[in-house]
Amino acid sequence: MTMLSDLLSNISQRRVRFAPRRTHDARDIDQCLTDLISGSGEASGRSTAETILDRYEAMDAAAKTEFFRFVVRNMDLSPDAVRAALEAYETYPDRRTYGAFMEAAEPRRQELLRRLNQVPGATERLVRMRAELLKAMKHEPELGALDVDFHHLFTSWFNRGFLVLKPINWESPAHILEKIIAYEAVHAIETWGDLRRRVQPADRRCFAFFHPAMPDEPLIFVQVALTRGVPNSVQGLLAEDRAPLATDEADTAVFYSISNCQAGLAGISFGNSLIKQVAADLALELPALKTFVTLSPIPGFAGWLAKSPYLVDTSEPEAMRVAAAHYLADAKRDDGKPLDAVARFHLGNGAQIHAVHADADISEKGLAQSRGAMVNYLYDLPRVAENHERFVGQNAVATSPDIRNLASQAAKTLTRKHKDDEPAL
């Protein structure tokens, strides 16, 4: 699969290199959109698609929103045609009536996006277009129908089978390393020296998913520390003066930062595949690795503490551990899933809440989002599938005995707030 993906990447790059020179087009953007969706000529279609993308990218935010409105209004499906096609299929279900129903049930917007994508380099441009659509939807939710179409197509275009897993190290191209710095979303990389400490030592690894149509753009990346034992603080992992560990002495792989890179691919899941693939590859490369854990932030913890019935002394490590365990294991949304988004992600991947730590991230961001607390999620590879199924089917939260014990202490050991202590909501 890697050879195939690399071949597709090379073909994609050649297509960009030998793309035809653009010519002036006097049509307005609405006419170009109509012509593209109604035409059938390949060469003229590519030229029209390129004109549309060029014109779109030159627009300001208001004009782009109007562009989205036009597409939503004028390229919707026909409910009457859908009903008629469904009735025909119900009456005589065969290949012809099924095909007619599928054609009627698909809005022309999806075909528009496919035809735009025939331009060399268009996939990356469409990803950026969706990122701008998501911004526009905050003010005009009715544009969401177009986002459903984007999501439907991107789920197929960015299928795991097309993704290429590549290691990132100090010898990687500079433009890729620059993007790792820019896209890092968990623990900021301030300088090139910071980056070097994360990717050059033998006990540090970084891996990213790429797509053949976007060979210079990481989609998501994970940073890994090889350690002896499970770490309890990110300060220790990222210390400037730490002594690197020989790889044959490491028994634990720690996923301490996972960053999604493309806002336009929101809702397209890569993280679960990335962690499991990296864990499997590292297990093959380094048989001494027996434990695969994260060292993760608890981004909703500080907000929950402010509204919870408990008055927690944040300077007391044990009280913080009890509160964090209770929050992760017991605080739920209306649908029964954990309140914390990072917890939902890892538990949905089949991980277990393994341990919680106070004063584990004392950076400004760490204190603001979780009062310095962090959590290890354990990826016990033989049990990942079982944990995943129980979480998806029963909302069952897999926890270690230590977490269960800590969470059970909340009602007995934490002080309840008086009414005067509760914040006004």
Image: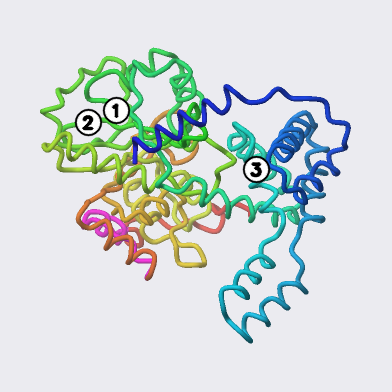
Residue 72 falls in image quadrant: bottom right
Q: Residues within 10 Å of mark 1 (few under 14, many from 20)?
A: many
Give the image location of residue 14, x and y in percent: 52, 25
Per the model, the C-alpha gap separating discs 2 and 1 is 8 Å
Callout 2 touching callout 1 (CB < 8 Å)? yes
Q: Quadrant of the C terminus?
A: bottom right
Per the model, the C-alpha gap separating discs 2 and 3 is 37 Å
The answer to whether one can see residue 220 in this image is yes
Give the image location of residue 180, x and y in percent: 45, 25
SS for dot 2? strand
Q: Of the residues shown, which amino acid type is indicated by label 1?
A: Arg
Q: Which residue is mark 3?
A: 130
SS for dot 1? strand
- Above or below residue 144? Residue 16 is above
Per the model, the C-alpha gap separating discs 3 and 1 is 31 Å
Magenta stretch: includes residue 400: yes
Give the image location of residue 275, x and y in percent: 33, 43
Question: Of tags 2 and 3, which is closer to the observer?
Answer: 3
Q: Is residue 54 left or right of residue 319?
A: right
Magenta stretch: includes residue 131: no
Q: Which residue is mark 1?
A: 205
- Above or below residue 115? Residue 53 is above
Q: Which residues are magenta?
A: 394-409
- Which circle's residue, 3 or 1, is located before the other in the chain? 3
- Which circle's residue, 2 or 1, is located before the other in the chain? 1
Q: Which mark is residue 226?
A: 2
Give the image location of residue 86, x and y in percent: 66, 78
Q: Of the residues shown, which amino acid type is indicated by label 3?
A: Arg
